[in-house]
Amino acid sequence: MNLTHHEYELIKFVILFYLLLFFNYFIIIIMTEANICQEASKTFKGPCVEQAKCTTACQSEGFQFGECSNSICYCTKPCPPN
């Protein structure tokens, strides 16, 4: 397959564009996740198997969300600014 110089440059541009989008996406995720504070729930009792119950317990503690991990209910919320 013979490509003209213009086609070759266009392909390089498209590949570079998608690579930049890809890396930008992960940088945003890393920056977002870096600002999440998490701790084990103080009020949740028993093994954590139902996300909804964990979230309810966490919200009563002032957190935004609850998440079960290794049967433990972890509460999460955005960290306060430094």
Image (cartoon, helix red, strand yellow):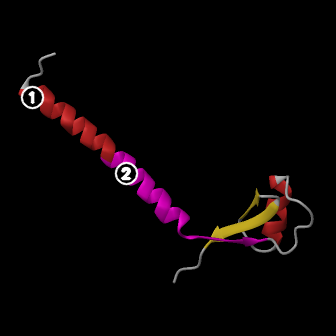
Residue indicated by mark 2: 23
Which residue sits at x=12%, y=21%?
A: 3
Region rendered in magenta: 20-40
What's the amino acid at mark 2?
A: Phe
- Disc 2 and disc 1: Cα gap in Å? 26 Å
Which residue sits at x=66%, y=69%?
A: 77
Which residue sits at x=79%, y=60%?
A: 55
Give the quarter of the image for residue 79: bottom right
User: At which x and y percent is residue 15?
Assistant: 27, 37
* Magenta: main secondary structure: helix
Which residue ends up furthest to the front in the rendered image? 70
Which residue ends up furthest to the bottom in the rendered image? 82
Which residue ends up furthest to the left in the rendered image? 5
Please tell me whether mark 1 sits on a helix, a strand or a loop.
helix
Which residue ends up furthest to the top in the rendered image? 1
Q: From the viewer's side, name the closer residue of 2 and 41.
A: 2
User: At which x and y percent is residue 7?
Assistant: 14, 26
Residue indicated by mark 1: 6
User: At which x and y percent is residue 29?
Assistant: 49, 57
Quarter in which the N terminus is drawn: top left
Characterize the local packing of mark 1: few (<14), some (14-19) or many (20 or more) Cα atoms within 10 angstroms.
Answer: few
The numbered mark at residue 15 is none
